[in-house]
Image (spheres, grey):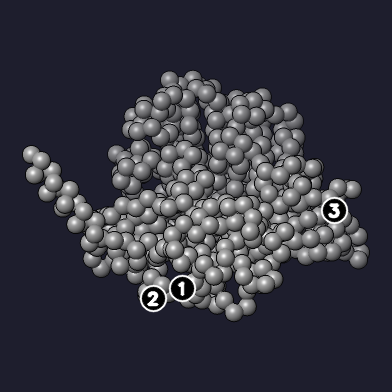
Amino acid sequence: MRLLIIFLLLGQALLAAQAQPSDALAAAYRAAAPFLNAATPPRMTLLREVPTTALGCELIAGLPLAQALDAWRFDFPTVDGDFTVHTSVDGNLAQLCDERVPNLGAGLIPLVDQTGSAASPPQDASCWLRANSDGLTVREVPLGNVVTTIDRLQQHKTLGRNETGDWLFYREGWVKRAAVRLAGSCAELPTLDPAIASSGVIHFCPAGYAGFLLPRISIGRGTARSASATFANRLRASPQPDAPLIAEIPPRQILDEVLDGPACQGSYVWWQVAVAGQVGWTIESDINTNFYHLEPYQQSALRPHTPATQPRPPTFRRIDKPSAPIDTIALLEIADARAVAFSPDGSLLAVVGEAGAAWFSSPDFAPSSHEAVFAGSGNLPSDWLTQSLDALAWSHAGDKLALGRGRDLQVWELPARQLALHYRFPYELRSLAFSRDDRWLAVTGGAINARRNALWIYDQHGELTRSLPLVGAGSAPTVIAAPAASPGDFLYSSADTLFMLPAAGPPRAIYQLAGVPQRAFALAGDSAGASLLALGLGAPGMGWLALVAGAEAHAPGRSLRLDAGSLAFSPDARFLAVATPKRVFVLGTID
């Protein structure tokens, strides 16, 4: 028995000796370097014959490989969870297998061919450093406190040097020039002051603002204002998210003066500003949300100090393919949003949650009051609109409003404000949808544990015509109207599958993800049928948004780092509203 154990141990040691991943690890560090804030050694796993897309990345669809091959998986520990990279064993192929990419509109990085050797730097204008030995100390400032260590396999982008050139700075701190090897474009590194370029407080931005959104404002008086029409900017004592809070800058507030900056820290670009007698640092942009919190401002000679009525280009085009460039048009600060819905003419976006319904006008997505929305109706159709709500849907003719609250359903006729239906269901209501021809109303509900779900279909007289049990699998069911080409049909989700439910006949499976929970979906359609399918996938807190072509739903799509719980396209498909646990994103494509 001892002899057998010895042989097993020797076999494992021999296998490990034959599969040293030094080249692969170097490639993984190279690919992940722009997204890592720590130099903690990664965990690694050798994958065997698993790739079905590109190097076995399951969350995204990459370029398919001609044949299966062994690959390494590297999990880099970060404060936000592991950042995963897959590489081929020889290090020639690398792919980021993580939805946390810096640009919301860029999707995930496809398969990249790193054709150089492990020692070759990426082919760009950057300067890269690598330690001469393991355990090289990284200091807060030259000759200062040690903040971390790096090993010789780790490669980092060099951001600058001190005045004498004997110390180099990268994202985590300062290292001795004599203790590292350099590769790439290192001849003209900028000179940095260690007092403002130090570990933890980086008052510096890398060349080309790699990993950040490009600044749009500049130093000067009256040159910028807060961009949002709905929420305030925070003014802090230093360019750090956890720095002491000084004040809040109101929406659309013109800054007295931009004093200093930019400073790049985390995912943010910061500026020092003066506003209303206060001086501090505030965020211009956040690349994780692809959103600018400050915008350039130019005073009008005709109407001084009057903000522009439309801060963004006024023309938007349809989002009709996964590859379309996507921008964050608006961020709506509504926590715990449970459902989003556009009005039939696309002029309003409704967001429902614990506080009832909130309304936002399109295309600027400024908040609207209940009185403005229901001006022609006198009072509100239902007091539910100011209480906790779970679902909302307009009829396509705009003459009915369906509301779901707990286990109760109300359908109101507009503008007469007459209650047409009020039913109670055995399960909590999850979603509501009128068919394209408004002849049918679909309702989905689920038990508290989401293990028992159901779909009910009602006719225009309020009579129940169909009832279908749905697979729970821990995810709430969603129902929407089918494309305009199928006026009386619905699409609904059941576990990991989407079904088409015709007005007559049995349901038909049209899209399936192997075991991945579908939390929400939306469809941008036209008279020809499906155009773009948006899917909210994954468990809450770890979800992502996938975009796939409706006509080729199984073709490679695109993923965005958004924990989507509810989705809605505007009727003209120019906007996609995405409800996440902390806020609502409105995505669009600007011409």
Instruction: Using residue 506 as the reference point, say whether residue 523 is left or right of it.
Output: right
Q: Is residue 188 visible?
A: yes
* Mark 2 or mark 3, earlier in chain: 2
Q: Give the class, few, some or many, for how many residues have Cα within 10 Å of label 1's Cα (few <14, many ≥20).
A: many
Q: Residue at x 75, y 57 (%)?
A: 271
Q: Residue at x 48, y 65 (%)?
A: 131
Residue depth check, mark 3 versus mark 1: number of the one nearer the observer: 1
Q: Is residue 526 visible?
A: no
Relative depth, front residue between 160 and 491: 160
Q: Give the class, few, some or many, for how many residues have Cα within 10 Å of label 3's Cα (few <14, many ≥20).
A: many
Distance, label 2 to label 3, CA atoms, is 49 Å
Q: Residue furthest bottom?
A: 187
Residue type for callout 2: Gly
Residue depth check, mark 2 versus mark 3: number of the one nearer the observer: 2
Q: Are marks 2 and 3 in contact (CB under 8 Å)?
A: no
Residue type for callout 3: Ala
**Residue holding disc 2:** 116
Relative depth, front residue between 107 and 27: 27
Q: Position of residue 120 (x, y in %)?
A: 42, 74
* Mark 1 or mark 2, earlier in chain: 2
**Residue holding disc 3:** 274
Relative depth, front residue between 55 and 71: 71
Q: Position of residue 490 (x, y in %)?
A: 41, 42
Q: Residue at x 64, y 38 (%)?
A: 334
Q: Which mark is residue 479?
A: none
Q: Which mark is residue 121?
A: 1
Relative depth, front residue between 324 and 136: 136
Q: Give the class, few, some or many, for how many residues have Cα within 10 Å of label 2's Cα (few <14, many ≥20).
A: few
